Image (tube, rainbow, N blue to C red):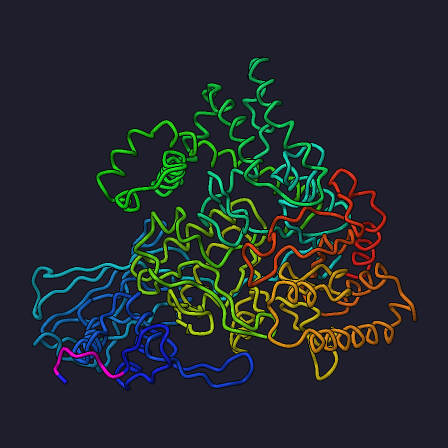
Amino acid sequence: MTADSPTPDTATPDSAPVEPSPALVQLAAAHGIATEYWSFFGDRVHVPAPTLRAVLQAMHVETATDDDISATLAEVEDAPWRRVLPPSFVSRPGARALPVHVPDGHDVRLVVALEDGSWRDLPVPDQAPVAREVDGATRWRVEVPLPTTLPVGWHTVHAFLTPFGGGDATESAQAGLVITPERMPDPPTRPGRHRGWGLMAQLYSVRSRASWGMGDFADLADLAAIAGAEGADFLLVNPIHAAEITSPIEASPYRPASRRFLAPLYVRPEDIREVAYLTPTERALVEAARTPVAAMDLDPARIDRDAVWAAKRVALDAIFAVPLSPARVAERDAFAAREGQPLDDFALWCALEEHYEGSARPDEAWDIASPLISDLRERLAGRVRFHVWLQWICDQQVESAQAAAKASGMAIGVMHDLAVGVHPLGSDAWSLRPMYAQGMAVGAPPDMYNQQGQTWNQPPWLPGALAESGYAPLRDMIRTLLRHAGALRIDHVIGLFRLWWIPEGLSPAAGTYVRYDHEAMIGVLMLEAQRASAVLIGEDLGNVEPWVRDYLADRGILGTSVLWFEREGDGFRPPEEYRRSLLATVNTHDLPPTAGYLADEHVALRARLGLLTRPVEEELADADAERAAMLTLLRSRGLIGEAPSEREVIEALSVLITASPSQLVGVALVDAVGERRTQNQPGTDTEYPNWQIPLAGPEGEVVLLDDLATLPRFTSLVSAVDARV
C-alpha cells in the first residue's frame, strides 16, 4: 500500500458499515464528532467510517489518506497555539480563564475594551506556563482569569506583545469577549400569582373574518388580547421566520428561509398606515386582491400560502408605491440602519427570488460575492428597497401584537418559537454560506415515535465558524426575535449542545452527533434574553442527556414537558413530581390534538402513511393501555367520572397538569376547540399536508377568531385552568 492509497476504512455511503481506524476516531473526536453513542433504545452504536469521513469533509478536514489524517491531527493540536487569542471567548463572570499563547521572549499585556466604551486592564497572574514547540519555535500558554467585576455584555479583549526588557509592541491581537449572565430570573407573573399559563397556537391556522385566508399579525394581536382577558400570561406561536416569497412557499415554519428576519406572509395589509392614502382605484385593487383569499377563511380543509401571498403581494406593491411622510421615512431609515448589511442581503435574496422566478438560477447567482450578484444588487435596487420596507412593516406589526398582549394583562406576552435550522436554498444558507456545513442535513436518530429517524433537510451550523464569527449570527437572530416578545421557545434545544448530522445520501439512522460549545451558545442566548427581559424555554424532549436538563435549570432556562411522555413504569408520573423549571403541556404540535390522540389518531395516521415498524395491532394495544392508564389516573383524582365525554377528558387533562410545580403551563388552542387533526406528522413531506390545517372544531367546522371568546368549549377549558394556576 502506498502513502497515497485509501485507508482501510474507506467505504461508499451505501456499503456495509466499516470500522474506522484509531487515527480517524481520534481526529473525529478532536472536532467534536461522536464516534459512538447510546441510542434511544439503549443500544451502544459505533459510528462507521464513511459517516465520520463525510462529517469531517463538511468541516473542511481532509481525510483521504493516512498521511492526511496524521497531518490534520497535528494541525488540530498546533492551531490554537499559533494564535495569541482564541477567535472569541464566552464566559460567565469569573467562570472561565482566557487562554493566551505568547511567543518565547515576549511579555503580553491584556486590555478589555468594554461595550460602553471604557477600558480595563486584564492582569496576567504569576504562574508556571506550559510550553509547546510550534513551527520550530517555542510558545507559552498562560491562563488569565476573568474578573468577576466584568459587566455582562459584548466586549473586546486586546493583547499586545512586547520583547523582554521593553520596547514597542511587536504583535497585537484582539478577540470578542462575551460576558454572559449566570442565571435567568424566574418568569414574571400577574400580581398575586406564583406562576402563569398561556395559549399555544399555530398562527397561520387561526383566522378571522378580516384575514386573507390565513392567520396574520393582526390575528396574533387579537388572539393575545382574547387569551389575556381570560387570565393567560403568554401566547406561544409557531416560528414566524421568513419563508420564500415566490411559489411554492415552504409550508413548514420550522424550515425557514431566514431565522433572523420575519415572514411578510403574516402582514395585514390594511394595518399599514399608508393604506389611508390610496386612491379609490388603488383601494379597489387591494380589495379585489383580498376577496378570493378571504373566502378561504371559511374553508376548513387547507391553508393555501401560495394563493395568500399572491394576493398580498398585489396589495403590498400598491401600498409601497404611496410616498412616505418625512416622519415615516425617518422611522424606516432608522430601522434599516439598525439592521445593516444583513437586511440588505436578505432583501437582495428576496429580489433574486423574484428575478429568477420560473427559471433556473445560474451557479454564479448562488455566490453572494460574485460579480453577477454585485451587478444584480444595483439592477434590482428598487425591489431590494421594497423588501427592506416589508421587514420594517413586519417589525411594526409584531410590535403592535406584543403591545396588545401586554395591554390585555399578560405578564409575558408573545412567546416566539426558534426553529432548529434553515432551508438549504434560503437566504441564510446563501448569505451566510461559510457558516453552514455543506452536504449535511440536521435530523434526529430513531426513537419510539419516529422509528426510522428524521431528516429535516437543513444544513447545520459549523461550530468553528460560529466561534470565528464571535457568535454574531446567533446574537443577531435572537435580538430580532426578542425585540417585540416576552419569551422564546427554542425548538430542539439540545441542538445548542449537539446536533444529529446526516451525510447526504445516507439514512437518518446513519448519522452521528456533533457537539457545539454549549456554554457559549447558551450564554449568548441568555445575554440577549436578559437585555430583552424575556423568558427562555428549551424544548428538551426525546433523547436528551440528563445533565443537559440540569444545566438548563441551573441557568434559569425552563424545559418542557408533555403529559403523554411523562411515564413511570406502566403508568404516568404524578404531576406533583414534575420539574419546577418547566413549561408543562398536555401535547405538542408534533402529536395529534388530544381529541385525536384519545381516538388513536397517532397510530392510525402513521399506519396510513407506512411509518410503523411494528404491526398496527401492537401499536393499538399499546395505545389502548396508555389511554386506560391515563383515565385511571384522572378518575383517581376525581377529575372525571366513569363514562366521561371526550370534552370532559380533554379538560381534565389540562387541569391535571396544573397540579405540577411547573413555572408555566401551556394550553393548546386545538384542545380548547376540540380539533382532531394533527398539524405535523414527523417523517412525512408530501404524504401529509403538514402545517396547512386550519383551526376547526370536533366536527370539522371552521373556528374563527371572532367567535373564540364566546365559544363555550374554549371558555370552559381556559377558565378551569386559570382557576387552578
Judge whether residue 644 is colored magenta. no
Query: Residue 39's spot in the image, x, y percent?
Result: 51, 80
* Number of numbered markers: 0
| Residue located at (68% from left, 44% from top) | 206
For the C terminus, give its image quadrant. Answer: bottom right
Drawn side of residue 290 relative to residue 479, left or right: right
Query: Residue 107's spot in the image, x, y percent?
Result: 15, 69
| Residue located at (83% from left, 51% from top) | 713
| Residue located at (69% from left, 68% from top) | 603
For the record, the magenta segment spans 2-8
Query: Which image quarter: residue 570?
Result: bottom right
Drawn side of residue 293 relative to residue 22, left or right: right
For the N terminus, give its image quadrant. Answer: bottom left
Query: Residue 58's spot in the image, x, y percent?
Result: 31, 65
Query: Residue 115's spot in the image, x, y percent?
Result: 36, 52
Q: Nearer the viewer, residue 137 or 241?
A: 241
Judged from this view, the residue extending furthest toward the top is 280
| Above or below, comparing residue 155 to residue 89 in the picture | above
Q: Nearer the viewer, residue 408 or 418?
A: 418
Magenta span: predominant SS is loop
Q: Nearer the viewer, residue 380 or 450?
A: 450
